[in-house]
Image (cartoon, rainbow, N blue to C red):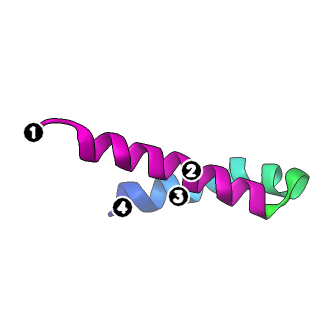
Amino acid sequence: MGAYLLTYGVSQLFYGPISDRVGRRPVILVGMSIFMLATLVAVTTPV
């Protein structure tokens, strides 16, 4: 849990300025797309 929160906090240093330049919606959509693709890869990998 601590690693997740640390990563979440540090990533704001990068996503904040990007969000200010291009807007929140594109940043959120890109992040959700990456999450969905990674989830699909994780689901389809053999155990």
Q: Circles 3 and 2: CB distance less than 8 Å?
A: no
| Residue 43 included in the magenta stretch of the image | yes
- Residue nearest the observer in this picture, 12 or 25: 25
Q: Mark 2: which secondary structure?
A: helix
Rendered image quadrant of residue 5: bottom left
| Within-10-Å neighbours for mark 1: few <14, some 14–19, many 20+ | few
| Marked residue nearer the N-terminal end (1 or 4) | 4
| Within-10-Å neighbours for mark 2: few <14, some 14–19, many 20+ | few
Q: Circles 4 and 3: CB distance less than 8 Å?
A: no
Residue at which label 3 appears: 8
Q: Could you tell me residue 28's position as x and y percent?
A: 67, 59
Q: Which residues are magenta?
A: 25-47
| Marked residue nearer the N-terminal end (4 or 2) | 4
Checking the image for residue 47, the label placed there is: 1
Separation of residues labelled 1 and 3 (CA atoms): 28 Å
Seen at 14% across and 36% down, the residue is 46
Separation of residues labelled 4 and 3 (CA atoms): 10 Å
For badge 2, the amino acid type reads: Ser
| Residue 41 included in the magenta stretch of the image | yes
Q: Could you tell me residue 11's position as x and y percent?
A: 60, 51
Nearest-to-viewer mark from 3 and 2 = 2
